[in-house]
């Protein structure tokens, strides 16, 4: 256990000397503990240079396991000994490109400021992540399709709406029904678990699926939104992103009675259900979105967005 703690500290500090300073031990002691761990596991864990250290591929895997083991030990001490668990170690978070950059990143920055011993790593993807298989602790996800073996807590209310620039509608006309969308330039997005070119929409308890197409498509929602602002077509985007643009009039609703429910969720594997780091992070995110008004779907005041 001591070797795992020393190794994790070296990774966090990216330095044997800095780790030894925090431990109050000599650099030789730190180097020896890491070397013993490497010999025990039969794998090289760190690339060493005169200026810094970096994880090898095997080191990445060992570091993830070390954090899980150390978190479990902290949880054990808290439950049996009654001592408060510290928020420390690493937390790997994933999210989608746009939402991760605009909404999750500021929240995690504030979380790290509040808990300086917590090392937060955020990675953004245009695909759905297998959290357990890929070593993530938390997925902050937009969309209500969640695997039953995962735990999910709703962070904020959200839905997607159809919208376009006034210049596009002045040129192409405004659709009066979902069937009319087939004759319009629709900006399709291949993003995470969204089926490409397929819009599943609801109205008064009814659901209808529309296959759309157009001359422009992308795997990045912000690119499609930029095209919509330029008058290139109709886009289906979340209220968290377009609410300020609709309020400003640079985008206008299209067929506003049709929406796609896509709430914001904190999703994590059951094995981390009792993780103190995860509990603190999720509670912080809940409060963050509640304070911004987004928890109730009021994205008007949830922070700056736009082109």
Image (cartoon, rainbow, N blue to C red):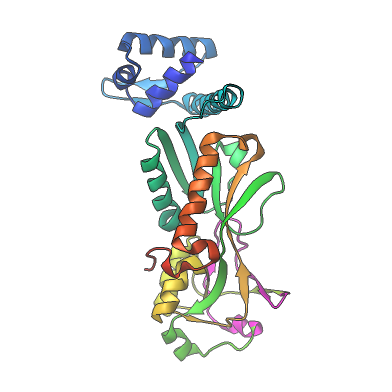
| Quarter residue 191 falls in | bottom right
Q: Is residue 201 above or below residue 179?
A: above
Check the image and report above or below for 55 versus 289. Answer: above
Q: Is residue 192 magenta?
A: yes
Q: Position of residue 289 (x, y in %)?
A: 48, 57
Placement of 253 over or under 25, stated as above or below? below
Q: Residue furthest front?
A: 82
- Residue lying at 58% horizontally and 54% vertically, measured from the top left: 265
Task: Locate residue 48: give its quadrant.
Answer: top left
Image coordinates for residue 255, horizontal then vertical, percent: 58, 83
Query: Which residue is more in the foreground, 17 or 134?
Result: 17
Residue 234 appears in the figure: no
Q: Position of residue 16 (x, y in %)?
A: 33, 18
Q: Residue at x 45, y 90 (%)?
A: 170
**Could you say which is closer to the camera, residue 148 or residue 167?**
148
Magenta region: 178-206
Inspect this view and state whether residue 103 appears. yes
């Amino acid at each position: 256990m001591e070797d795992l703690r020393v190794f994790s500290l070296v990774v966090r500090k990216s330095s044997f000397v800095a780790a030894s300073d925090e431990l109050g031990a000599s650099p030789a002691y730190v180097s020896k503990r890491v070397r013993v761990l490497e010999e025990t596991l039969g794998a090289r864990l760190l690339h060493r240079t005169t200026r810094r250290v970096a994880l090898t591929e095997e080191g990445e895997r060992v570091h993830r396991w070390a954090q899980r083991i150390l978190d479990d030990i902290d949880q054990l001490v808290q439950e049996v000994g009654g001592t408060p668990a510290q928020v420390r170690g690493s937390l790997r978070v994933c999210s989608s490109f746009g939402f991760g950059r605009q909404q999750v990143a500021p929240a995690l920055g504030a979380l790290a400021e509040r808990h300086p011993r917590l090392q937060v790593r955020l990675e953004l993807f245009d695909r759905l992540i297998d959290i357990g298989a890929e070593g993530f602790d938390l997925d902050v996800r937009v969309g209500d399709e969640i695997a039953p073996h995962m735990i999910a807590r709703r962070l904020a209310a959200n839905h997607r709406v159809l919208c376009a620039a006034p210049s596009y509608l002045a040129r192409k006309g405004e659709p009066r029904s979902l069937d009319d969308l087939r004759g319009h330039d629709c900006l399709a997005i291949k993003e995470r678990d969204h089926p490409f070119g397929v819009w599943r929409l609801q109205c008064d308890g009814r659901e209808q699926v529309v296959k759309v197409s157009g001359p422009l498509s992308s795997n990045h929602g912000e690119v499609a939104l930029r095209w919509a602002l330029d008058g290139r077509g109709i886009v289906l985007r979340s209220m968290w992103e377009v609410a300020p643009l609709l309020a400003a009039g640079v985008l206008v609703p299209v067929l506003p009675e049709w929406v796609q429910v896509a709430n914001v969720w904190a999703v994590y594997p059951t094995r981390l259900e009792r993780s103190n780091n995860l509990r603190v992070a999720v509670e912080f995110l809940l409060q963050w979105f509640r304070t911004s008004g987004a928890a109730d779907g009021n994205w008007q005041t949830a922070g700056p967005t736009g082109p």
